[in-house]
Amino acid sequence: MPVAYDPALVALSIVIAIQGGYVSLTLAQRLRARAGPRRKALLAASAVSLGVGVWAMHFIGMLAVKLPVAVNYDLLLTLVSALVCVLVVGLGVFTASFGPLTPARLAFAGLLMGCGISTMHFIGMSALQANCLVSYSPGLVGASVVVSVAASSLALWLAFADRRRHSVLAGAAAMGLAISGMHYMAMAAATFLPADVLVAISTPVLSLDLLAIVVAVIAFLISGVFLLVFLPDRLGDPQRAEPSETSGTAPQPGSDPARVDRIPVSCNGATLLLPPEQICAIRADAHYSRVFDGTETYFCPLSISQLEARLDPDTFVRVHRSHIVNVRRAAALRRVRSQGLVQFDSAGDYTVPVSRSRMRRLQTALGL
């Protein structure tokens, strides 16, 4: 049975994939500067944006197929495919963001997400209702799954690799093209044959072209809402911290709380302003912090998450749920069982524990 594609819908599907990837990467870039509920909300928004973008791309790509028979789609299976996509993409994003993006973690998350997206595709194909039979080439199906896993790994690496800067637009384009390549390879694996027994196919309420436009608009709106809600006012600075819900204060006009010249600490009833370069380590103390400068430990009214968001992430690394260290003041790193200890060249024996999940990031920051 001859199969043709609507070029306009093919182009629209690719644009949707790139747009969803762009929003997802933009939100994912800001995860390192967040903690607590705000980080979870950003993570969910990034996962849903990518999941909706991937599913919308696949569905519009299926609508782009033009068969010489009437075509409709089963609503329940179509919804199931959408839910599967958002779920597996969310699991992949969560797995990749749960700790340092090691090769093993990236491979597992990419495999989980890629196999899930392939499953979503074939569930969506099973929703196709037409007077034809669909057969698949095993070789091309296997190749499409490999491309899906590779595309998913690329997407997760672009989102969570420990790099401070990369072109979000270029990354989104690469991600969108890779995901689109997986879809159209899977479509190439399908052969449509005339059915032996014809059945009545109900005419869809909306034309397939109009349905594609509706899906595209909904995907754009979902991503647009996430982008508007979670991005700060100054879009040029993705690491800019927003006012904390618990701090009770807001940054002054023109200030940039993501980069500060001084850290306020209390000493003998007075407020001292410590330059960040003088700080060795920061320890969480309930909703506040303790700041060690190599000689003294001071009380700081800011939480450890607020301080992490305000300090340079290249210099100050979160090595434990309750500890941040200045890698430029570190004197030694020792292994103690499965964890580590950072030592400082300071008065007294001051050490900071390093959790196993954060050891790789600290070693990278130290150049080890």
Image: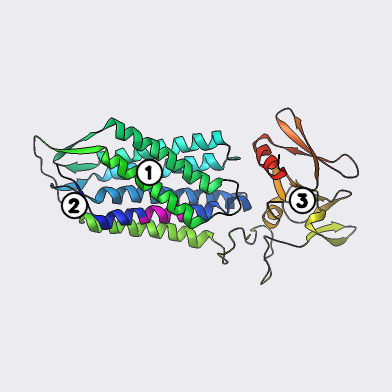
Examine the rendering and report whether any part of residue 368 can be seen.
yes
Look at label 3 and name its amino acid: Ser
Coordinates of residue 122 in the picture (x, y in percent)? 30, 38
76 sits left or right of 130 in the view:
right
The amino acid marked with disc number 1 is Leu
> In the picture shown, does residue 112 fall above or below 8?
above
Residue that extends furthest to the top in the rendered view of this protein: 337
Q: Amino acid at mark 2?
A: Pro
Span of residues in magenta: 15-22
- Residues packed near mark 3 inside 10 Å, few (<14), some (14 to 19) or many (20 plus): many
Crowd rating for badge 1 (residues with CA inside 10 Å; few <14, some 14–19, many 20+):
some
What's the residue at 70%, 29% (across, down)?
338
Q: Quadrant of residue 341?
A: top right
**Along the line of sight, the residue nearer the viewer: 298 or 332:** 332
Q: Which residue is mark 2?
A: 204
Q: Residue furthest bottom?
A: 253
Q: Residue at x 48, y 60 (%)?
A: 227
The residue that disc 3 covers is: 289
Magenta stretch holds residue 314: no
Q: Is residue 336 above or below residue 84?
A: above
Between marks 1 and 2, how big is the CA–CA gap?
Answer: 22 Å
Q: Is residue 136 above or below residue 38?
A: above
Q: Main secondary structure of the magenta part?
A: helix
* Quadrant that contains the N terminus: top left
Q: Secondary structure at mark 2?
A: loop
Query: Which percent across, then down, holds residue 2?
Result: 15, 44
Measure the C-alpha gap from mark 2 to mark 3.
Answer: 61 Å
Can you identify the residue that label 1 sits on? 83
